[in-house]
């Protein structure tokens, strides 16, 4: 019998999962916490975040301005109470991260060197060079390693949440579902283990890999959102997929290398093939308009010109200052033969962030009892229809704090699960021989999404996407029912579910907002 018991089970090891674990572990030293993650300990969207974390530090800045920028970028459908809470909590969360050892860049006066990105009315982004996510992930892993009551298990793939649906002969009412943990595939033994916990936290990150071109790492396959969907949790705003305007143009490369928005904040210009700064005609904020506007302008530029990319011009910038701030981006460009002193950087938009996801309240609670969601897999109401740059790590930090507080407040309910939960039933399944079917279907889902459900949508394209996805769904389910499960097969199933949810919610939305743009709604 492979049952594993803990008080808290956290799925995912990015900023959301690690911060939740650290705060609960410190406050409840006698409680046991498992963090499971499907790859290496540090592999997450967090690790690749370049830009930074937005927070009000400067005397000339104010909460009101950060709140206003967030709501303008979100096209006014953000939840105003959530925006206020997150932005007002930001400085304290940052102070804690700094106390734990995170190092953010300073200027020569000894103040934080605050960056600026699209949609921000002032400089307010704390960063560590152009590898802020790496610095944060490293800091959090050091904290986790120092805490005896946390076990971090790499190469453990969460397959499904365990809910009342798994209890034999139990009638389940749709608005009274409990979560008891998750079935997890141990990738070293290939056994599916039953992890039972009083509280489960989804911190599984993003869904970018549902598109052929994305800035997200290979692990960003929307596993948490798909599991929550199968468990019948409430999900919202899946149609708001944010495309980052400036991924390095390298056809076929996945993930696409990100040229941080902070580079435009540093003064870089976007130009078309003729060398024209086309953003000047689109928005008075030009290159620093919110991402949805810039990404759509590039898409339009490419449609008109028939070109495959536009350019980022850094040739007028102070090179020494540039390499000090963006050493990683400079190295990457040099490795591709691009010398930013002379050459323009070829860029295109790529899928970057899901603003929607598992609906949660201000305490991070989902519609399923004892199930929380934190970070990109959640939909809190902070981002509205389009996330403001560098607000995502911030959201994860604030909600991790709130979830930890809620679990601490409920500590008397941290009791072992006493339900009769069956083990995963693998009877009659076989090891699939045709792995090519899985990789073919994955690529097909990604291409359908990139071709038909990208920056600009139409009803016809969405309906066509739905038909194609339905075919892949049937095929994948057949394989799923007869096969021994592998991470590849589960990821395909999850990506298909995410694609379906994006398409369905896109068809339902009849008003264009933020990152969502359907020509039939004009
Ligand atoms: C970037 O560095 O451009 C990405 C930052 C973000 O997604 O907020």
Image (spheres, rainbow, N blue to C red):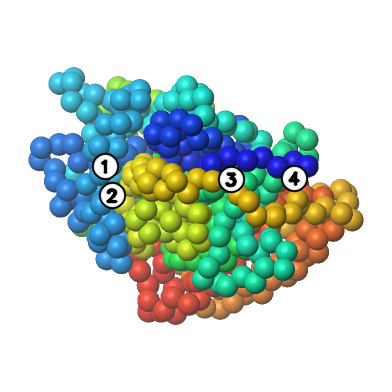
Labelled pair 2, 1 in contact (Cβ < 8 Å): yes
Between discs 4 and 3, the one toward the N terminus: 4
Nearest to the eye among marks 4 and 3: give it: 3
Location of residue 207 in the rendering, given as x and y in whole percent from the top left corner: 54, 53
Nearest to the eye among marks 1 and 4: give it: 4
- In the depicted structure, whether residue 124 falls above or below residue 118: above
Quarter of the image with the C terminus is bottom left
Residue 7 lies left or right of residue 318; in this view the side is right
The residue tagged 1 is 90
Between discs 2 and 3, the one toward the N terminus: 2
The one nearer the camera, 137 or 421, is: 421
Q: CA distance from mark 2 to mark 3?
A: 33 Å
Between discs 4 and 2, the one toward the N terminus: 2
The residue tagged 2 is 86
Q: CA distance from mark 3 to mark 1?
A: 34 Å
- In what element is the residue under mark 4? strand
- In what element is the residue under mark 2? helix
Location of residue 495 in the rendering, given as x and y in whole percent from the top left corner: 62, 57
- In what element is the residue under mark 1? helix
């Amino acid at each position: 019998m492979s049952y594993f018991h803990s008080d808290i089970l956290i799925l995912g090891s990015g900023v959301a999962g690690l911060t939740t674990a650290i705060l609960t572990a410190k406050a409840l030293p006698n409680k046991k916490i498992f963090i499971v993650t499907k790859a290496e300990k540090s592999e997450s969207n967090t690790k690749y975040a370049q830009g930074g974390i937005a927070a009000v530090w400067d005397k000339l800045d104010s909460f009101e301005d950060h709140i206003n920028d967030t709501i303008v970028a979100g096209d006014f459908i953000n939840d105003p109470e959530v925006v206020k809470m997150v932005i007002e909590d930001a400085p304290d969360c940052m102070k804690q991260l700094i106390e734990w050892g995170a190092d953010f860049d300073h200027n020569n006066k000894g103040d934080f060197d605050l960056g600026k990105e699209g949609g921000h009315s002032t400089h307010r982004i704390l960063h560590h060079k152009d590898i802020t996510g790496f610095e944060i992930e490293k800091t959090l892993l050091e904290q986790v390693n120092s805490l005896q009551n946390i076990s971090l298990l790499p190469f453990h793939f969460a397959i499904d949440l365990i809910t009342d649906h798994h209890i034999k002969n139990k009638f389940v009412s749709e608005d009274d579902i409990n979560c008891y943990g998750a079935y997890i595939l141990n990738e070293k033994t290939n056994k599916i283990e039953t992890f039972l916990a009083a509280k489960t936290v989804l911190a599984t990150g993003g869904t970018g890999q549902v598109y052929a071109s994305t800035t997200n790492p290979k692990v960003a396959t929307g596993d948490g959102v798909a599991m929550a969907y199968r468990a019948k949790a409430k999900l919202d705003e899946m149609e708001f997929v944010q495309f980052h305007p400036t991924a390095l143009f390298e056809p076929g490369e996945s993930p696409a290398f990100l040229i941080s928005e902070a580079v435009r904040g540093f003064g870089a210009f976007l130009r078309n093939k003729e060398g024209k700064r086309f953003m000047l005609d689109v928005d008075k904020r030009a290159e620093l308009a919110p991402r949805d506007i810039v990404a759509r302008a590039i898409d339009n530029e490419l449609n008109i010109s028939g070109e495959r990319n536009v350019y980022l011009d850094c040739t007028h910038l102070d090179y020494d200052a540039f390499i000090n701030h963006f050493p990683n981006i400079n190295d990457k460009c040099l490795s591709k033969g691009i010398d930013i002193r002379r050459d323009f950087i070829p860029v295109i938009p790529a899928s970057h962030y899901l603003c929607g996801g598992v609906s949660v309240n201000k305490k991070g609670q989902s519609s399923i009892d004892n199930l929380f969601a934190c970070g990109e897999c959640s939909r809190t109401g902070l981002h509205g229809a389009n996330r403001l740059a560098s607000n995502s790590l911030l959201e994860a930090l604030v909600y991790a704090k709130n979830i930890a507080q809620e679990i601490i407040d409920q500590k008397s309910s941290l009791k072992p699960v006493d339900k009769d939960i069956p083990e995963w039933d693998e009877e009659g399944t076989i090891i699939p021989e045709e792995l090519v079917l899985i990789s073919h279907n994955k690529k097909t889902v990604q291409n359908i999404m990139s071709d038909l459900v990208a920056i600009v949508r139409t009803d016809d394209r969405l309906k066509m996407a739905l038909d194609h996805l339905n075919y892949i769904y049937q095929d994948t389910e057949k394989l799923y029912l007869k096969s021994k499960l592998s991470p590849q097969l589960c990821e395909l199933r999850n990506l298909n579910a995410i694609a379906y949810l994006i398409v369905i919610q896109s068809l339902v939305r009849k008003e264009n907002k933020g990152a969502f743009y359907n020509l039939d709604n004009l």
